[in-house]
Image (spheres, rainbow, N blue to C red):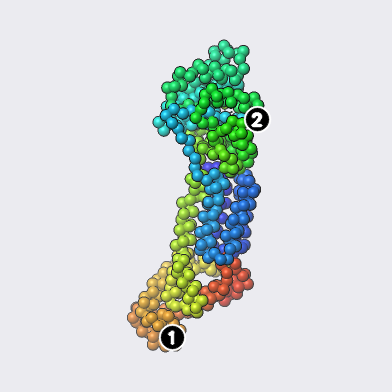
Amino acid sequence: MALEKLGQSLKSGIKKISNAIFLDKKLIDQVIKDIQKSLIEADVNIELVFALSQKIKKIAYDETIQSIDKKEQLVTLIHDEILQILGGEAKELKLQNSSSIMFLGLYGAGKTTTIAKLGKYYAKRGRKVALLGLDTQRPAAMEQLRQMADKASLAYFIETPEDKEKNSKLTHTKRSLEVIKKYSPDLKKYDLILIDTAGRDGLNKDLIKEIELLNKTLNPTYRILVMPADVGQAAKSQADEFQKALNIDGVIITRMDGTSKAGGALTACAETSAPVYFIGTGEQIHEIETFNPESFIQRLLGMGDLQALLEHVKSATDESQTKRIEDRLKEGKFTLLDLYSQLEQMNKMGSMDKLLGMIPGMNVAKLPKSALDKQEQKMKNWKCAISSMTEQEIENPEILEKQTSRIARIAKGSGTTTTEIRELLKQYKILKEMMGMQSGMADGNIDPKMMQKMAKKFKGKMKF
Ligand SMILES: Nc1nc2c(ncn2[C@@H]2O[C@H](COP(=O)(O)OP(=O)(O)O)[C@@H](O)[C@H]2O)c(=O)[nH]1
Ligand SMILES: [Mg+2]
């Protein structure tokens, strides 16, 4: 699909944000740089890119937003902003029982191809479609439309070689009017008429005059400008010019498949009052799709993935839990139950080695799978042990260290060993200290020196 590279880069940026334990400035700046680069490569207006970067920074650097909220807000922001610059809500061409669409555009924009594609598209959806060929200017235009209509099994009405011969003294605009006159009765039998018109090198007076005349004669339901994606950001001025001169109702962007500028064309149209209704994605007759910014971005960002990532972020950190633990730490309280829920959360986020691996300066050799299985078993045993403790013991694990008889009692009562309980107590101490340090760091604003210190202190001590 078009804009694959942009999609990949946005996706990887979002992943980086979601997977990061700490949203430090370095990470955010890197993500912004990547996103900027890919948006600019996709020809998106630099001002839009800059505005998006500023919005990301505003949230990312805001120390009052909790890390978990921040991740969610950032992912949502990127999604929503890209959606907006692609045009927001999807627009649909509303067709009545008897509708007609006139297609306008410069030479080679893809008008004739698009008409055949759309003819097939609507015929498949139960419309009785006819193609009307009014490009009497280009010699091969009629034959091209005939061939494409045949291929798509669609009815067509064109200037025949005999008509052309007969009217050879007329201007081509007048010859187009002759075509309309000739087929008017036949066209009444169809409920959707797609009208092909002639182009020019640019929107000149001649073209405006011709289209105005055809518009007056036919009074089509819609006037749609066809533009190839490779015009990039120039799509804005082209759409604006056609809008001003001929009051167009919307745009179709063709050749989305063959250019790196598709992003420019799409986002440029979003800045005009002409919505993009369809995009052409190849030369084949079926290669056309409705343009729906939301589903487009879902594919661009791999929304299935995105949803999963968001859920991962949400589920990995239970906000109220984290808040409770933070509060308890502030009060100088951190019990074994807090330890347990904290460990569970860390577990959900990924293995301990991965977690520690994200701390700069920490070099953790990858743990074998069996170690991770053991970790789960250990967690279960700890849970049993904690449930055999008295409330006083849970609230003040320190008393256990002083009274070994308590440890023996708990081990017996929970079917665990005293070694395991000692280990639990050791982890508790380490984590309490670690969290004490961590809570001293503002979210997303990590002091590298502190991280180094922490890494050094805990290196090899985490027993997972
Ligand atoms: N790759 C690609 N080529 C297209 C697409 N739409 C049109 N074209 C090609 O663009 C060229 C010009 O198309 P045409 O319909 O003749 O443009 P017109 O002059 O506006 O009628 C042709 O070679 C088409 O095959 C598209 O979506 N993708
Ligand atoms: Mg044509």
Residue at left offset 62%, top offset 52%: 51
Residue nearer the viewer, 147 or 76: 76
Residue type highlighted by circle 2: Gly
Dot 2 corresponds to which residue?
Answer: 202
Q: Residue 333 in the image: x percent, y percent?
A: 47, 79
Dot 1 corresponds to which residue?
Answer: 399
Point out the residue furthest to the top here.
Answer: 166
Answer with left or right where residue 378 lies relative to residue 355: left
Answer with left or right where residue 214 lies relative to residue 190: right
Question: Relative to 121, does residue 140 appear above or below in the rendering?
Answer: above
Q: CA distance from mark 2 to mark 1?
A: 86 Å
Numbered tag placed on residue 170 in the rendering: none
Which corner quadrant of the image does residue 33 belong to?
bottom right
Residue 452 visible here: no
Residue at left offset 46%, top offset 28%: 99
* Mark earlier in primary sequence (2, 1): 2
